[in-house]
Image (cartoon, grey):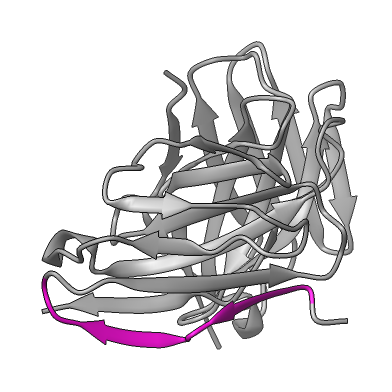
């Protein structure tokens, strides 16, 4: 039972480079989301999806793109990395709708942009 | 805009004491409130989920209460152990799809 799997675990980028953070879940969850966690600021929502082909912006979407072509996968793309995007990124998923389903998190990707 | 606050930011207690962690939120229109545990360098683990119609939830030594009218939740951990040392985060679900607004967390250290 893999749950939510994120790759890579660590990444170092130079300013201006692009990359994709991968997220996959095997629980058939409709809802998937990306958060970033910065010291003293808690987790902030970047983008989310309520099903294949449906995505929307969260609180801090600038500089990031997402797509949802399958129920299982929800990749996060950094278009042109900036030092301000140095953070820990978490992918999370849940069943949607009733408010009774807890959010399941991956183990995170620690990204450093130099 | 919903704001979630956790006070204190850090807490240290001797082993065996009961832990009381506080969470407050500004908008009572929530779908649920969730408590998570985060160990250093790890992801978040769901501890308890209280639906908006509920007043409390219990799991083992953990008990969480919810008072929507006052915008407060409290997580109680009975008879704390060094293994309870972690950061505890609360989050409120703000729409039916699953969006969560998080507090910044309380870092707990339980000393032997």
Span shown in magenta: A3-15
Q: Is residue A99 magenta?
A: no
Question: In this rendering, is residue B105 above or below B7?
Answer: below
The picture places residue A106, in percent across and down from the top left corner, at: 62, 71
Instruction: Give left or right: position of A90 versus B60.
Output: left
Give the residue displayed 72% in from the left and 32% down from the top: B97
Near-viewer residue (B80 or A59):
A59
Question: In this rendering, is residue B64 above or below A91?
Answer: above
The picture places residue A79, in percent across and down from the top left corner, at: 28, 60
Question: In this rendering, is residue B27 above or below A114?
Answer: above
Give the residue displayed 74% in from the left and 26% down from the top: B96
Instruction: Give left or right: position of A80 versus B108.
Output: left
Near-viewer residue (B70 or A55):
A55
Which image quarter is the C terminus of chain B in? bottom right
Question: Is residue B11 visible to the viewer in this orientation of the structure?
Answer: no
The picture places residue B18, in percent across and down from the top left corner, at: 66, 60
Near-viewer residue (A111 or B37):
A111
The picture places residue A44, in percent across and down from the top left corner, at: 41, 46
Question: Is residue B75 visible to the viewer in this orientation of the structure?
Answer: yes
Question: In this rendering, is residue B101 above or below A2?
Answer: above
Give the residue displayed 42% in from the left and 18% down from the top: B1
Q: How many marks?
A: 0
Quadrant for residue A74, please give it: bottom right
Prevailing SS of the magenta stretch: strand
Near-viewer residue (A16 or B26):
A16
Give the residue displayed 28% in from the left and 43% down from the top: A62
């Amino acid at each position: 039972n893999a749950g939510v799997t994120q790759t890579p675990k660590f990444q170092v980028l130079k300013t201006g480079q692009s990359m994709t953070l991968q997220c996959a879940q095997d629980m058939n969850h409709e809802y998937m989301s990306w958060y970033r966690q910065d010291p003293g600021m808690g987790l902030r929502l970047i983008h989310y999806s309520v099903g294949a082909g449906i995505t929307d912006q969260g609180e801090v979407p600038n500089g990031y793109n997402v797509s949802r072509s399958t129920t299982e996968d929800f990749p996060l793309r950094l278009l042109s990395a900036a030092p301000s995007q140095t953070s820990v990124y978490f992918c999370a998923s849940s069943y949607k709708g009733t408010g009774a389903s807890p959010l399941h998190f991956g183990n995170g990707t620690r990204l450093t942009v130099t | 805009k919903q704001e979630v606050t956790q006070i204190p930011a850090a807490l240290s207690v001797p082993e065996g004491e009961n832990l009381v962690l506080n969470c407050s939120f500004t908008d009572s229109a929530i779908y649920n409130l969730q408590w998570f545990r985060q160990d250093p360098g790890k992801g978040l683990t769901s501890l308890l989920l209280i639906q908006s119609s509920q007043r409390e939830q219990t799991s083992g030594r953990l008990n969480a209460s919810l008072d929507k009218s006052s915008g407060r939740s409290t997580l109680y951990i009975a008879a704390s152990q060094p293994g309870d040392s972690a950061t505890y985060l609360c989050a409120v679900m703000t729409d039916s799809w699953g969006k969560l607004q998080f507090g910044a967390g309380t870092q707990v250290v339980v000393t032997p």
